[in-house]
Image (cartoon, rainbow, N blue to C red):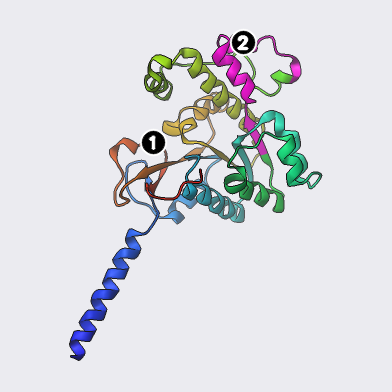
Amino acid sequence: MHNKILAFLLIVSLSFSSIGQDLSPYSIFNSDGKKVKAKKMLKSLLKSDVVFYGELHNNSIAHWLELKLLQELDQQTDVSIGAEMFESDNQKALNAYLSDKINQSQLDSMARLWPNYNTDYKPLVDYAKLNNLPFIATNIPRKYASKVYREGGFEALNNLDTLEKNWIAPSPIAFDIELSQYKNMLTMMGDHGSVDMVKAQAIKDATMAHFIHLNLKENQLFYHLNGSYHSDFHQGILWYLKRLNPNLIIKTITTVEQDQLKSMHKDHLNKADFIIVVDSEMTKTY
């Protein structure tokens, strides 16, 4: 009887151990599809000049990991932060909030915050505020990206005044429609796609690269948050940033979703230096 009880307890223990492993919400893989531990990823990131975290905008695990990674990086090196989620003409308002000159309510009215700001990005901004870290609004004001799409490409920006041009990457804007991510955009959009639509994406990438480059400091790691498409396959923002400084050491993270976490789907190989594979059933923030 005693042996039967021990056997039963062992089975229960093993069952809960198995369930615990199945309930893990994410796994980390390198570009070759090999599982890696968070400590190994962090060690690699700390050797970089710039780290891009490519998120899925509504993925709760991605947002949590962005904050945890910022905290880890900040403990071990000098860090500044940048984000697609803030447009360059809102930098003044963002700085005012970081320096306690305005409160959250005033920031809400002065800056164009994303609808999921409070749940997904405010924790990062508040961490920067508490720890006196620079936070750079890197993205182009959306109305100018819209002009590129709707009014004839990059030339639509030629008549902007000097102040407006200061919020955008300097002209002329390089462009390569043969980059696989840009070609994929045309394919995905089908009959609704156009080269000017891709150029609207490119002007965002170029502007984010411009403001990252403008705010790089020696012996300081620049940690940038953006949608994964802007940095996947080392294209998008990275293509422009490398044109500005080909000697930068850059590492990328991307977020993908899968039904299982034991192995990474081959479609994600080489998508980034580190791929965060999140359980597809994980809660979405919107």
Amino acid type of the residue tagged 2 in the rendering: Ala
Residue for badge 1: 271
Give the residue furthest to the bottom: 2
Secondary structure of the residue carrying tag 2 is helix
Please determine whether, in this image, residue 114 is positioned above or below residue 67.
Answer: above
Please determine whether, in this image, residue 215 is positioned above or below residue 80.
Answer: above
Circle 2/circle 1 CB separation < 8 Å: no
Q: Which residues are magenta?
A: 136-163
Does residue 155 show up magenta in the picture? yes
Badge 1 density bin: few <14, some 14–19, many ≥20, Cα 10 Å: many
Name the one closer to the observer, 234 or 5. Answer: 5
Q: Which mark is residue 156?
A: 2
Residue 274 percent location from the top left of the image: 42, 44
Residue 234 percent location from the top left of the image: 45, 31
Quadrant hosting residue 138: top right
Residue drawn at the location 67% of the way across and 41% of the way down: 135
